[in-house]
Image (spheres, rainbow, N blue to C red):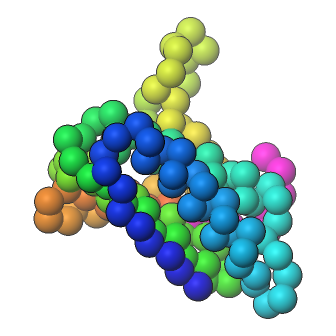
Amino acid sequence: MRISKEFAGTSGAIAAARLLTNSFLRGAGTGGAAVREDTVERAVLVVSELVTNAVRHTDGPCGVELRIDGRAVEISVWDTSSDAPVAMGPDPTRIGRHGMEIVAVLCGGYTVTPRRPGKHVSARLPLDAAGA
């Protein structure tokens, strides 16, 4: 199962991408079983962080693609900037800019793939992940 959608590069894209993710995963089943609530919540958070980066750091549209392959939710967000996101090191005094750290922890990392114009930032979230 998969879904993709393009959004304008505005702040409204963040909420729309969260809603898309929530609706898709709640409507998707894997072998007759619903996607676990904690997995849906994690996926919504990952999408939110990636789309927030796309909106804040690029000048153009962005898009989300979600795919369930039976073992994981594959999350890919594209935007029009070729600049790769940067995961900053832990800093309890820093306010904000923890998005890529969150993605890396929840998904075990992420990949950045060039596209024209811009890039795809992709991560895999296991369907059977227990609470972190």
Determine whether 35 is above or below 104 in the image.
below
Q: In this view, does 121 lie to the left or right of 47?
A: left
Residue 100 visible in the displayed image: no
Q: In the rendered view, does 112 fall on the left or right side of 29? A: left
Position of residue 5 relative to residue 16, above or below, is below
Quadrant of image for the N terminus: bottom right
Instruction: List x then y, in percent, for residue 57.
Output: 28, 36
Decide which of 62, 42 is in the foreground and name it.
Answer: 62
Q: Does the magenta stretch include residue 130?
A: yes
Q: Is residue 57 visible?
A: yes
Q: What stretch is highlighted in magenta?
A: 124-132
Marks counted in the figure total 0
Q: Which of 92 and 7 is in front in this view?
A: 7
The percent position of residue 98, horizontal first and vertical second, equals 52, 30
As drawn, 53 above or below 107: above
Residue at horizontal 30 percent and vertical 45 percent from the top: 9
Magenta stretch, main secondary structure, is loop
Which residue sits at x=80%, y=55%? 38
Quadrant housing residue 23? bottom right
Q: What residue do we see at 20% from left, 65% from top?
A: 115
Viewer-nearest residue: 36 or 132 = 36
Find residue 76 and report its horizontal and vertical position in percent. 43, 64
